[in-house]
Amino acid sequence: MENEELRGRIREVAREVLGEALSLGVTTWHAPPRGYVNVDEVDPDTGQVAFRTLTSTLGEVHLRLWAKQQGLLEEVEALAKRLRALAPRPPSEQEQWELRVLALAQEVLEPAGHDAVVEWRGDGHLEVGVHTFDRREWRFQLETLATTRGDVPEPGCARRLGLEAQALALAAKLGALGFQAMRAPEPEDEAARVPGVVEAVLEQFEYGHHPLNSLFDYLGMPDWDEIDDDRLRRRVLEQVCAHVRARAEEEKTWPDVIPADRLEAAFDVLRARGFVAEMSASTTMSGGWEVSRELADLRREQGETIVGTVFFDQQDAASAMEGHPLHLAYGLVNDAEDDAREDERTEAEDAKVSEDAAAVGRTIVEVLREHGFTPEWSGDASSRITLKPAFVWRRRRARVDTTETWSLGEGNRILALLVEFLPRLRAFEFFPGDGVGVHELRSDSLRELTLCYDREEAAKDALATVVAQARERFPALQSLTVRAGGFEETVEL
């Protein structure tokens, strides 16, 4: 039976059994074929519809207490039997678990005056709870009490609803089922991207230019954003974190001063003298000049006089990772007025520009020598400076991971696992959820933590739990804030 035909038959039977007084909706699912009768709540002002499932072609009844209150329990049970006959088939394994968990949940919650709600979670488990109605958003909200993991994930919610005992009872019964997570197979096209994304992230990591929390913004292809499956995203992060931990251990064996430290010190001196000095600036030479121009303009706006620039790009860094000498680009960084009249310069003016650029090169060479290098340079403004002696490029992460504040969007919450490796991080804001929660994070430097939720009730429910988790995971934490829309509450620790 096609979906449209099944939908029409269900609608016909539902009206025959329950009449026209109720606002009912019908939905169907094609694999395996299943139809639902829903009770609609229609906003009289906007026409917006919120619905709850009443029964389906599996023959179960969801809203038993609601039906009883309406004086329609017998009719709804009769409808369930009629629907079962419309599309007779054995329940799938997932549906068998749904029915089993629903029956168990009804056994616990109906005596407490609540219809049970069972839904699949993103992690392949079932969650059990009750519906509340949000009139402002005009939707039913599932308030989760327990899951087939055997846990009570939101104890604050159970307390608010006065259902703590029922939540604990549900958790115990669900945990005893021995349920194993049931998730769809990993999407093959996304799984195939994982190795490439990991490789691209670690390549950016080795360039030593961007802090960890920014690496995923500079990948190009394959693109991190093309991986949606949270299992695969976690796999990427686990591999990246393992590499970062290994690097941290490796750095403990490094000499007190490595060549990159001396080069950084030289660049610091040049910056103090009015230079833009950038390492692994962009992916190409032209990109490095664009970066230099942007940084020069920013510093000019702050009142600085810019003498020139020196940089090497990621292609240069990649070569140096193999032990080849670094080649440094350098020169003047024009302002907008200089650029506008570049084509109008006289030969004498061009010669003056070349001499000024050569003077920039001489200053760079002098500073490099002061820091233990023996640079090779022709003295010509059109030639690059070759840094000698050659060394394998590697940079201490403490010089790179200088992020102090980080606000992480909901769609990339799994990146929160990186906070452990940001030694200067002081303030962090993110959306906890199924992908990653506070209990999985740690930081020895974090002082301010802000957690964002979609509902005020959820923020309030979570507060006591996340405070306890944060005390354990963030020893330097001074304040924790939960936020949802216009609601905000801060706890000083």
Image (cartoon, rainbow, N blue to C red):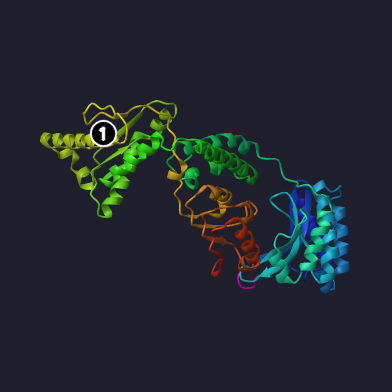
Residue 140 image-quadrant placement: bottom right
Q: Which residues are magenta?
A: 42-46
Q: Position of residue 161 (x, y in %)?
A: 73, 71
Residue at 68% x, 64% y is 141
Q: Is residue 264 left or right of residue 4?
A: left
Give the overall secondary structure of the magenta segment.
loop
Q: State which quadrant residue 472 falls in.
A: bottom right
Instruction: Give the residue pinned by disc 1.
Output: 365
Count of numbered circles on the image: 1
Percent x, y of residue 202: 51, 37
Q: Is residue 179 magenta?
A: no
Q: Where 74 sits versus 445, above or below?
A: below
Is residue 274 shown above or below 65?
Answer: above
- Judging depth in this view, the residue of 114 and 243 nearest the camera is 243
Q: x%, y% of residue 139? A: 66, 66
Rendered location of residue 380, percent (x, y) = 21, 28
Between 114 and 285, the one nearer to me in the picture:
285
Q: Quadrant of residue 174?
A: bottom right
Q: Is residue 52 left or right of residue 281?
A: right
Name the residue rendered at 42%, 32% in the picture.
393
Q: Is residue 91 left or right of residue 264?
A: right
Density class for disc 1 (Cα within 10 Å; few <14, some 14-19, many ≥20) is many
